[in-house]
Image (cartoon, rainbow, N blue to C red):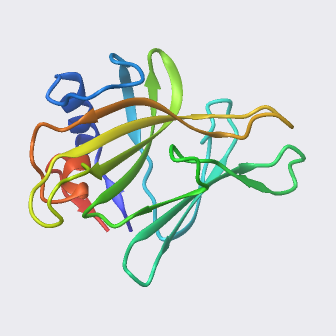
Amino acid sequence: MMKTSIKGLLAVFLLIAAGSCSHGSAREHARITHLQSIALRPGVNKIEMLVPDGRAGMIVTATEPTGATLYLVMLPDNAGTGWTTVTTGTGDASLKADGVNTAVRFAKAWLDGSPETLMFTATRTAGAAPAGPATYNIVTYRLVTGRPGATPSGFEEVSNQRSSIMYSSADSAIADGIPVVR
């Protein structure tokens, strides 16, 4: 089971809000409140009200032979008879996180006064030594639902911050020292 505590996610937001991270961002001062972590277990996780309009969705987690975790987010299709994948911040349908170089977390929150589903990623900064402490890019995305027959649903970047603190892993960077239960 993988669960991030509310304190851990709040620590990431406080880190960003306090300005201890510096890097370009899509929106410099997004205000995040009412944070509620989405706990995931291996396999299919049906999430009630994943979409702010009240629709449920699914987040599927699977472990690769390498130990990395794959994440796939899905929403009901327009006909209501199946599921469609949601693109990630990279434009792909799935994300891979190994916990050392990359980490992923999901939460429901209010962003600038509106209810949102958020995804957070922590990625080791380019050029960092392959082993040992490094800085990480912490990116916040919000789920944007597409229009039928037009735009696919996906995660849109809200902020992109580089930590000024060195971390030993992406899991540590995203949780800022709060333990992650797997």
Instruction: Say whether residue 74 is left or right of residue 135.
Output: right
Q: Quadrant of the N terminus?
A: bottom left
Q: In the orientation shown, which residue stands out farthest toward the front? A: 127
Q: Quadrant of the C terminus?
A: bottom left
Rendered residue at 24%/48% (across/down):
125
Mark count = 0
Q: Position of residue 152 (x, y in %)?
A: 72, 40
Q: Is residue 104 above or below residue 140?
A: below
Rendered residue at 85%/43% (across/down):
78
Instruction: Say whether residue 76 is left or right of residue 12.
Output: right
Q: Is residue 167 above or below residue 149?
A: below
Q: Position of residue 55 (x, y in %)?
A: 70, 40
Viewer-nearest residue: 129 or 91 = 129
Rendered residue at 33%/56% (across/down):
103
Q: Find residue 149 and report its image quarter.
A: top right
Q: Is residue 98 above or below residue 120?
A: below
Q: Position of residue 151 (x, y in %)?
A: 75, 35
Q: Find residue 139 and report its image quarter.
A: top left
Q: Find residue 21 and report its image quarter.
A: top left
Instruction: Say whether residue 30 is left or right of residue 99.
Output: right
Instruction: Say whether residue 81 is left or right of residue 142.
Output: right
Rendered residue at 44%/48% (across/down):
38
Q: Position of residue 99 (x, y in %)?
A: 29, 63
